[in-house]
Image (cartoon, grey):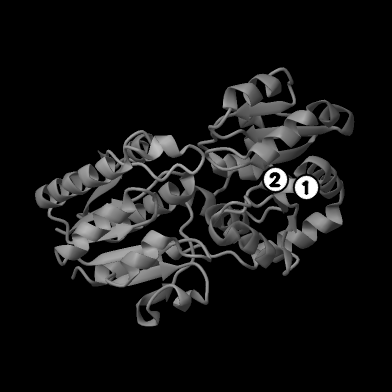
Amino acid sequence: MSKIIIAGGGTGGHIFPAVAIANAIRQLAPATEILFVGAKGKMEMERVPQAGYAIEGLDIAGFNRSSLIKNIGLPYKLIKSFFQVRSIIKKFKPDAVIGVGGYSSFPVLRVAQKKGVPTFIHESNSFAGKSNIMLGRNATKIFVASEGMEKFFPADKIIISGNPVRKAIVQSTVTKAEALRFFGLDEQKKTILVIGGSLGARSINETVAAHIRDLGPLGLQLIWQTGKNNSSNFIDRGKAYESIWVGEFIVEMDKAYAAADVVISRAGAMAVTELCVAKKPVVFVPFPFAAEDHQTVNAKYLVDKDAALMVKDDEAKGKLFPAITKLVMDEEMQQKLRHNIASLAITNADEVIAKEILKYLQ
């Protein structure tokens, strides 16, 4: 029986692909024992057990760019996390370790590599993170979503797999009517889905909040995932309206996609991947401070293929609401975007990754 550690988390963009990989491994090799390692206080500590897997939490945090004083304890936390990882690996004795990005990924893969344990990396973005670049030198294989990643990783280690998507989304059979009933919304109205990521997107949320009163006269309704940051303020604003479902986080994203006519979204790698699979007309508002501005790169790739629309973050206040209302009223444009975004979908990345990893354990 093989034992595998999957390390990483912090956001849904890391957690959901990790769970998809775990599920694929378990399906192909049911006897495999899988342990997740995440960061204490982060969403993986809740989401991973919900998915049916055990998880160990590390006392680790990332660099806080907005408040330098909060970084004082970082060296101590990093050193402590390495001791915790050594203890976990000594006790669990993994045959392989998979890193999906996030704070906990680096110390776990670093220790595993020093102990000679095969390590695998999944890099979801078109610009690799610094930790993954460092770890890539000694990794067994590196799974990437797009071409041209040789500038970050050794070419002979790269496998272009795409990004794993939750089976609930890939295999969804939920009808639009069922999905709208789930959210308590009107089957006759056009529906906008707003997803700014698990932590939230201020520019998107503030624009939506500013135009809440404009939805009714246009015959529109809203499914609004506010994300964690400042969520109570936006939830209070939205709850006053019958035509708005509002919440911090949507667990059943397959239903949210099924209910939506059009979508407003950030352009993180996993959001883009899921929207391709869900075949949804989308207006992207890329997060401008992502490393190397990779969200704009992600969005532009689709925009250049007539598969999506884009509004810059600093222009969201004036341009986002007109862009989404114009799209929701234009059936011809929706159809074109649906057709083009669907052609970019990859639905079996989890199986590709699982099979490749299991090859090394036989």
Residue behind mark 2: 264
In the image, 339 versus 229, the foreground residue is 229
Name the outermost residue toward the left: 91
- Which amino acid, mark 2? Ile
Asked if 333 appears above or below 72 in the picture, the reply is below
Instruction: Please provide percent x and percent y for residue 264.
Output: 70, 45
Instruction: Please provide percent x and percent y for residue 1.
Output: 14, 58
Q: Are marks 2 and 1 in contact (CB under 8 Å)?
A: no
Residue placed at 75% from the left, 52% from the top? Answer: 311
Instruction: Please provide percent x and percent y for residue 154.
Output: 37, 78
Name the outermost residue toward the right: 217
In the image, 114 versus 22, the foreground residue is 114
Residue placed at 40% from the left, 68% from the top? Answer: 143
- Residue 177 seen: no
For numbered disc 2, what is the local secondary structure? strand
Pointer 2 local density, CA inside 10 Å: few below 14, some 14–19, many at least 20 = many
- Residue 207 seen: yes
Tag of residue 70: none
